[in-house]
Image: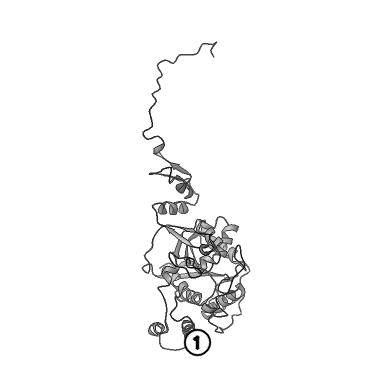
Amino acid sequence: MERIPIVIDTDPGIDDFFCLALACAYSDRLDLRAVTTMGGNNHTDVTTQNALNILSLFRTDVPVARGADRYLEAEFGALAAKCHGVNGVGNLVLPQSDRTPDDLPAWDKLYEIAKAAQGELVLVTVAPLTNIALALQKHPDLPHWIKKIVMMGGSIGRGNITPYVEANAGHDPAATKLVFEGGIPIDMVGLSITLGCPIRPDVFERYIPAQRGGFREIMEALIRFRSGEAMHDAVAISTLLDDRLMTWQTGEITVELAPPERSGQTVLHPSEHADMRAAVQLIAGRAQTECSGNVTKENIARLKDIGVDFVSSGALTHSAPILDLSMKHLRPLDKEEA
């Protein structure tokens, strides 16, 4: 089986730990080419060091590129110490990696790797989407080089930072909107799905071999810290390991920016236009596109917003009154008339 080339954009984070753990454990199926870090669960310096430490546990030298120090339009807010501990990893003291972050910032490292993967890269995002938005702003051709995004974020239903908004989408709503409108296909694994996937110590005991060891004890401690809560980010990357885990619904996602309690809300619009939008994204400007069929004055603006070059409508001429022009009485002009 050919391995899937991936980059993980993350803000470790306990559930981020398990997302990275799955990527490393299934290295026969996932080709982890880089990790990019973002603030969110903690400050970017902390999440970057956490990523380096976690990867060192797996003895991997995958590059880690440091990301943004603020959201697109705001500074970082309160840290998620209640969910992840003061240091982001359940207050555990992990062995310190002696590695340092990559010389390139996250958005440039992503672009470099995406181009090298020649359009086959899958980007797994389990953090606020600031780094991806910055990459799109700096490298407008990035959508051409990324096969799809697998995103833990958003929600079709309840939120967790407001009644409507999930954290990764809501911490940087401007970035979320930019990425959803950026032309890259997105598999959104939202809060409404991941909340149904908690992990408990008894489940851990049932499925993890009994022999003890340093790494196993770290995992056990993290699970006990989050006992009964969902491992959101691990669910997202699991969809790359087994496509039978999810039943996907195709549609258009729009991102609300107002009012404040809905800023970052992801809204699903199941529609007959979803496949058309996906086709336009796949073509990515390499050819001109045209759509037609059931075009009305009510839906023509929505069709235009899909990104097609031409919208054809037979309704413009259908059943129009006919004017019969006859050529019988035409005659050459006299010189004086000419």
Whether 114 is drawn above or below 335: the answer is: below
Tell me residue 277's x, y (percent).
44, 52
Whether 91 is drawn above or below 35: the answer is: below
Quarter of the C terminus within the rendering: top right
Quarter of the N terminus within the rendering: bottom left
Q: Can residue 158 be seen?
A: yes
Color scheme of the displayed model:
one colour
Tell me residue 41's x, y (percent).
55, 74
Tell me residue 244's x, y (percent).
36, 68
Q: Which residue is mark 1?
A: 214
Identity of the residue drawn at 49% across and 52% down: 284
- From the viewer's perspective, is 153 left or right of 319? right
Q: Alpha-carbon neighbours of circle 1 within 10 Å: few (<14), some, or many (≥20)?
A: few
308 or 257, nearer to the observer: 257
88 or 1, nearer to the observer: 88
226 or 265, nearer to the observer: 265
- From the viewer's perspective, is 181 left or right of 203? right
Tell me residue 37's x, y (percent).
57, 70
* Location of residue 238 (image quadrant): bottom left
Whether 144 is drawn above or below 317: the answer is: below
Q: Secondary structure at mark 1?
A: helix
- From the viewer's perspective, is 81 left or right of 185? right
Q: Amino acid at mark 1?
A: Gly
Q: Can residue 27 be seen?
A: no
* Location of residue 75 (image quadrant): bottom right
